Image (spheres, coloured by chain):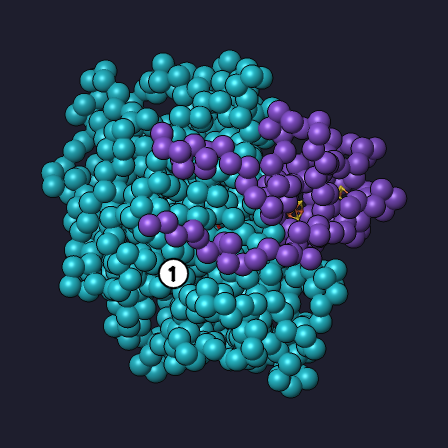
């Protein structure tokens, strides 16, 4: 490993080159700013969750009917989110939807169905209108990635960001390393956008294989962890997300079946979904998962997805589009020797993620304002790591908002035209030597990141998962904190494992934030997204509130805020303007680490 | 530290997770992990694409070298996303699912949490 540093100076550093990261980079580049994207993948066109393609895009189109207006959707957001949502940010997001859609189309994404040469829109996930465009999104990521390259964004590939640099409460860059070459980067930037996705690998699933996950297993909450350490406020971290999967393969393979008319049945053959929601199989994802969990707990499992009643042409279409949800799904059924046309498919719940608990617009993660900025000056967040999110559309719109927010901040706001502070090299060396120490852990001390992560997953599954109570959460917190002490023993045998070790520590920290937040919310909300066995009912009188969490030194500091107000109302930087230039001569470095 | 925490901290994860718990200083006694990615050595044109595209950094291929086959270096970290297979210009890649996936016997209720009071 080289001793020297690669120093990079830029206007904007984007961490994570997925959907949100690319969509943030684009308006910043268009504004003439210099943009560096730091990405773990090698190819921008395919990295992140959607490298293999997507098939639905949630949007308002203002096509005429009332349901297709921002006002109509916005009116329904409180009920879609059970009242816990940042309405101010969501309002901006929904209003921006048509503009961002047109912009993505201008990159070459074709949202139209070639059969009709028109948009094919579907109603799904309990939304109050046919908001989802069904389209062939095989090239979606490629088109937006190409746009970043066309506008001459710089991409640091196979490079993992590990820590943000802050001076006097304002961001000025990040440290990162390339896990193929071992090269370390000290990037100075006038603004940073965190877009590294949601938290996965955090609980057990049916196959017992941690990388067999519904969402991308290489998104491990690094943005949330780095943001937390730098002082950013997080919200909604108590909510977990799960989905239904064909048992044994944690993939979204059931969506395609259910949206075309498959029924869920339990071991007695009963079609039970209407017991839980009058929309039946068309209910919100959180409701559907919750119903299946309940059937299993009632002893009515196994649960199956049943397609046998469907007409041949529908079954043909299903079979032809099986690979849309997951490219390898047809191979899975084939190797399993299961024919879903003739046999019901056994269903499991997936592992958990911290993302948006199956609910549109209620993201779990870094709190952002209407410009995508977090509570830390100059630090933005977008996509599945931010408090307003919603699949590729949410990531695109909030990403784009953040990119424009960065441009306007650097043009007019704090930090405009200013010189960047010098990197505190002793701090940087300290972070690097703590990181690389994982490669030199003594054999006798050695702890594998796999073992460590399994312990986190066991703890989360048992006590922080879909059934929670005070005692279990406290036990989990004690365990997770004890595991933190073991982190320095994590052994990396090579640079690839050094990346995994950093992911493992992000996962543990996010688990702790989830347990702390879940302990604070003394009610049940959105079914198994936050089910407190000791507070089994929703309590609208006392709990129309956000649970927020931030770095409190030794421990996370948890608080609550009324959900009627935007999260940004609690940002300290909004109570007085700070300017990092004022303090540049100050030698004290406020790195919270 | 309470007894429960000690137990949780050190407990071997049960049944299903065993295969993922290698490399804990006991690597020599562990079975080799299932390799999901089979590369047909005769068909492969050693083009580097699978190495480039894998989102998990699992496939290593000597760059710009038309002699060496790609190596699946971290097979137990595979997402089963199929990107490598879909990008391979000569269809040299086949993906095989392990028995834990295709003949999964896990009781789903074990994923639904433990209740202590
Ligand atoms: C198989 C699949 C199919 C889906 N289909 C749809 C669909 O049809 N419609 C829909 O609306 N949604 C879909 N989704 C959800 C959607 O993909 C996500 O909501 C969306 O991609 C979120 O965007 P993001 O930018 O936050 O995350 P991503 O697009 O996943 O990007 C995160 C990026 O950050 C990088 N990264 C992570 N950590 C670091 C680090 N420390 N340093 C540097 N880089 C890092 C990752 O490599 C990744 O490229 C699908 C998800 C999956 C997994
Ligand atoms: S993509 Fe296919 S042909 Fe190219 S190196 Fe990989 S296996 Fe060989
Ligand atoms: S299936 Fe996906 S994760 Fe597995 S080796 Fe291929 S590209 Fe990598």
Q: Position of residue B77 (x, y in %)?
A: 62, 41
**Residue drawn 37% across and 45% down?**
A28
- Mark 1 falls on what kind of element? helix
Chain letter for mark 1, please.
A
Q: Quadrant of the N terminus of chain A?
A: top right
Q: Position of residue A400 (x, y in %)?
A: 37, 53
Nearer the observer, B5 or A129: B5
Q: Nearer the viewer, residue B75 or A55?
A: B75
Quarter of the picture holding the C terminus of chain A? top left
Q: Is A315 on the left-hand or right-hand side of A511?
A: right
The vertical placement of A99 against A277, above or below, is above
Q: Residue at horizontal 31%, vertical 42%?
A: A474
Q: Is residue B12 above or below residue A559?
A: above
**Residue A50 placed where, x, y %?**
54, 54
Q: Colour of chain B?
A: purple
Residue farthest along the right direction in this orientation: B42
Say which residue label 1 marks. A528
Left or right of residue A249: residue B113:
left
Among the chains pictured, the one given cyan colouring is: A
Query: Is residue A447 toward the left or the right of residue A556 in the image?
Result: right
- Identity of the residue furthest to the left in this view: A576
């Amino acid at each position: 490993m080289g001793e020297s540093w690669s120093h990079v100076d830029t206007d904007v550093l984007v961490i994570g080159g997925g959907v949100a990261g690319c969509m943030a980079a684009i308006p910043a580049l268009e504004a003439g700013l210099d943009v560096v994207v730091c990405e773990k993948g090698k190819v921008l066109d395919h990295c992140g969750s959607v490298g293999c393609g997507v098939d639905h895009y949630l949007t308002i189109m203002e096509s005429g009917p009332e349901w297709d207006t921002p006002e109509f959707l916005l009116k329904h957001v409180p009920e879609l989110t059970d009242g816990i949502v940042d309405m101010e940010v969501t309002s901006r997001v929904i209003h921006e939807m048509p503009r961002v859609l047109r912009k993505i189309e201008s990159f070459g994404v074709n949202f139209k169905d070639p059969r009709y040469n028109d948009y094919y829109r579907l109603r799904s996930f309990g939304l109050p209108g046919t908001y989802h465009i069904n389209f062939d999104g095989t090239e979606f990521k490629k088109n937006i990635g190409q746009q970043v390259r066309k506008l001459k964004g710089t991409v640091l590939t196979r490079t993992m960001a590990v820590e943000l640099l802050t001076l006097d409460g304002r961001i000025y860059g990040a440290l990162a390393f390339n896990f193929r070459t071992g090269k370390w980067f000290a990037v100075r930037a006038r603004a940073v956008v965190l877009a590294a996705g949601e938290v996965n690998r955090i609980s057990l699933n049916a196959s017992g294989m941690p990388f067999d996950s519904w969402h991308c297993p290489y998104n491990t909450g690094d943005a949330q962890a780095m943001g937390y350490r730098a002082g950013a406020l997080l919200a909604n971290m108590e909510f977990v997300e799960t989905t239904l999967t064909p048992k044994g393969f944690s993939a979204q393979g059931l969506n395609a079946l259910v949206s075309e008319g498959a029924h869920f049945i339990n071991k007695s053959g009963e079609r039970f979904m209407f017991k839980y929601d009058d929309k039946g199989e068309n209910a919100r994802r959180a409701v559907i998962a919750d119903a299946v969990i309940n059937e299993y707990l009632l002893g009515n499992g196994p649960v199956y997805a049943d397609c046998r009643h469907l007409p041949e042409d529908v079954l043909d279409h299903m079979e032809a589009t099986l690979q849309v949800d997951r490219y390898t799904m047809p191979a899975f059924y084939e190797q399993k020797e299961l024919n879903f046309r003739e046999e019901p498919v056994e269903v499991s719940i997936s592992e958990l993620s911290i993302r948006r608990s199956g609910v549109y617009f209620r993201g779990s993660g870094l709190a952002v304002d209407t410009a995508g900025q977090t509570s830390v000056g100059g630090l933005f967040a977008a996509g599945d790591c931010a408090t307003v999110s919603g699949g590729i559309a949410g990531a695109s719109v909030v990403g784009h908002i953040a990119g424009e927010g960065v441009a306007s901040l650097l043009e007019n706001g704090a930090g405009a035209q200013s010189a960047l502070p010098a990197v505190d090299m002793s701090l940087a060396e300290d972070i690097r030597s703590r990181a690389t120490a994982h490669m030199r852990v003594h054999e006798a001390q050695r702890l594998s990141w796999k073992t460590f992560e399994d312990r986190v997953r066991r703890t989360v599954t048992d006590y922080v998962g879909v059934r929670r109570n005070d005692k279990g959460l406290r036990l989990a917190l004690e365990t997770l904190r004890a595991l933190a002490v073991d982190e320095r023993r994590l052994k990396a045998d090579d640079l690839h494992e050094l990346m995994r070790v950093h992911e493992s520590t992000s996962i543990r920290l996010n688990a702790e934030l989830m347990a702390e937040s879940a302990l604070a919310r003394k009610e049940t909300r959105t079914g198994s997204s936050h089910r407190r066995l000791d507070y089994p009912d929703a309590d609208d009188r006392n709990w129309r509130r956000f649970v927020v969490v931030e770095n409190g030194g030794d421990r996370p500091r948890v608080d609550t805020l009324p959900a009627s107000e935007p999260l940004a109302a609690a940002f300290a930087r909004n109570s007085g303007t700070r300017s990092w230039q004022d303090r540049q001569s100050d030698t004290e470095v406020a790195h919270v680490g | 530290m309470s007894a429960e925490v000690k137990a949780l901290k050190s407990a071997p994860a049960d049944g299903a997770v065993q295969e993922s718990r290698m490399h804990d200083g006991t690597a020599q006694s562990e079975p080799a992990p299932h390799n999901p990615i089979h590369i047909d050595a005769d068909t492969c044109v050693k083009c580097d694409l699978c190495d480039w595209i894998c989102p998990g950094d699992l496939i290593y291929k000597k760059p710009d070298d038309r002699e060496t086959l790609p190596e699946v270096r971290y097979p137990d970290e595979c997402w089963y996303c199929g990107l490598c297979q879909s990008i391979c210009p000569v269809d040299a890649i086949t993906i095989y699912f392990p028995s834990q996936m295709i003949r999964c016997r896990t009781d789903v209720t074990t994923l639904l949490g433990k209740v202590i009071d």
